Image (tube, grey):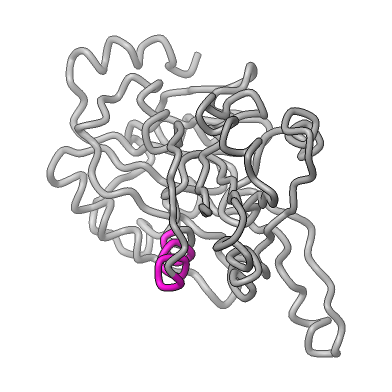
Amino acid sequence: MVLYFIGLGLFDEKDITLRGLEAVKRCKRIYLEAYTSILLCDKGKLEELYGKPVITADREMVESYADQILEGADVEDVALLVVGDPFGATTHTDIQLRARERRIPVKVIHNASVMNAVGASGLQLYRFGEAVSIVFFTETWRPTSFYDKIAANRKLGLHTLCLLDIKVKEPNFEMLARGKTVYEPPRYMTVNTAIEQLLEVEEIRKEGAYDGSTMCVGLSRLQADDQQIVAGTMKELLSVDFGAPLHCLIIAGDIHVVEEEILAFYKVT
């Protein structure tokens, strides 16, 4: 029997590949990983297409109870559905390692992810450097490890893909201290918030990795009918409404003439 890691693509239930759909229909249990990303359609649409129930694998299950997903995968086919591509997050690599340690056969069915879909911006994928994650700042936690990676990419003339934070099923720590488990409402970082935090860090570091005049591309809801791709300086993008989640941001490096021609179609007007 097999544990399948199946990429769902970026938008809705129709983005699964034919190979992925065939595998799903063979599986006895189906889990939808809902921690590292979100699907831009209701889970019910997946169940309608598959003709069987889909179990939501939230943060708690993925981080603390992943063995529930593996249970029985040695005697029946089980699927873990992942938004984008199965290995866009290290979490899924960890689950794969656990499966292999149990001698459970693993098969991977890939799909489009944000890592390649950002090529829609016109910036060439082979001219990207290391991607970074931008997390929500709090009053007491304002990590800046992304800054050095962006600076290194920019020094080499490379573009930087910034993956923006999502908070799903985050516990309220004040209530947790009182012995009650209460979850905060979901939060999804916008391009605007990411730029505000980036500029705040530059103001502190003052090393010139970027500034308000640095060319960027903001993207939202890639693959959806209402996707947005907008190019402009950081300062210009601050005032753009990118709409509903999910968002990501590209900080441009050196821009090739062909890239410049395509970016012109997406410039802030």
Direction from residue 199 to residue 157 in the image, left or right: left
Classify 128 as above or below 56.
above
Taking depth in this image into account, of 187 and 82 the one nearest to the observer is: 82
The magenta segment is 93-102
- Looking at the magenta stretch, what is its main secondary structure? helix
Report if residue 238 is visible in the image.
yes
Percent across and percent down for residue 254 are 18, 31
Quarter of the figure with residue 159? top left
Percent across and percent down for residue 92 are 47, 58
Report if residue 239 is visible in the image.
no
Percent across and percent down for residue 170 are 71, 67
Count of numbered labels shown in the rendering: 0
Direction from residue 157 to residue 191 in the image, left or right: right
The residue lying at 24 percent from left, 38 percent from top is 128
The residue lying at 42 percent from left, 24 percent from top is 231
Residue 104 falls inside the magenta stretch: no
The residue lying at 52 percent from left, 27 percent from top is 17
